[in-house]
Amino acid sequence: MIEIYYVEDDLDIAENVKTYLEIRQMAVSVLYSIADAKRALLRKRPGLLLVDRNMPDGKGDELCKWIRRLWGNQLPILYLTVRGETADIVQGFQDGADDYVVKPFELEVLYSRILALLRRSGQTKELRIFCDHLSLDTEKLSVFCDQEEILLSQPEYQLLLLLMENKGKTVTRKQLLEQIWDSNGNYVNDNTLTVTMKRLREKLHNPTCLKTIRSFGYRLEESI
């Protein structure tokens, strides 16, 4: 199911769009401020973002620029706005929008534009994995807590990557030992995993999303 974030302060429009898209098997989370949108995006990147350019606490175009600085062109962005002048539309695309729909709009048209955007971005490689305030860039091999880059050793990075890739699932200690150390020809005892996990937690500022499943393994899951 495609996950969509919709940044909109008009409750009626937001509810109509959400209801229409969810009937068509899309999961829509409505965010009523720029601040809420940034918090949600730092936890998880959706499949597509719908954004109103005029929000109570800021401008949608500033949010768009922030997203492009953070992820480049990985997240498709569609503006929904009353600003329909030619100059506004041109500026919207210059700020990083992938498409632009002027209010009022037909829901069927919006749905078609969303499908077109998703088709165009369907082959985009998933480069960042998220859990709460943690993000892992699989291309740059870098890890961030909010926007602070965290320097990890190779075993620490591999440990976090395995848990990120299996977010919501418990990964056993045996699986972690086999995939991180045994696969590299390094046969270690169980205490090595315990020490590595302890160091990883400390470097990540002891995130609440990283759970210990006693006598079994570990699991990463969203705290909110």
Image (cartoon, helix red, strand yellow):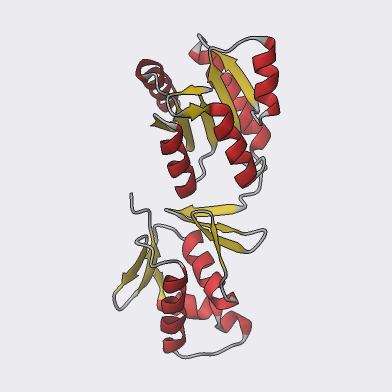
Q: What residue is shown at x 45% (from left), y 66% (from top)?
A: 204
Q: Position of residue 181 (x, y in %)?
A: 55, 82
Q: Which quadrant of the view contains residue 9?
A: top left
* Residue 14 % position (x, y): 40, 21
* 102 up-or-down from 172: above or below: above
Q: Against 165, is 38 above or below?
A: above
Asked whether, in this view, residue 50 is left or right of residue 194, the answer is right
Q: Quadrant of residue 182?
A: bottom right
Q: Is 25 placed left or right of 85 in the picture?
A: left
Q: Residue furthest front?
A: 57
Which residue reaches farthest left? 214
Image coordinates of residue 8 in percent, x first then y, are 44, 24
Res 170 seen here? no
Q: Residue at x 65, y 48 (%)?
A: 125
Question: Residue 69, image x and y in percent?
Answer: 64, 43
190 and 75: which is toward the camera: 75
Q: Which quarter of the figure has residue 119?
A: top right
Task: Determine the residue positioned at 57% across, 13% down.
Answer: 83
Q: Nearer the viewer, residue 164 or 43?
A: 43
41 relative to 115, above or below:
below
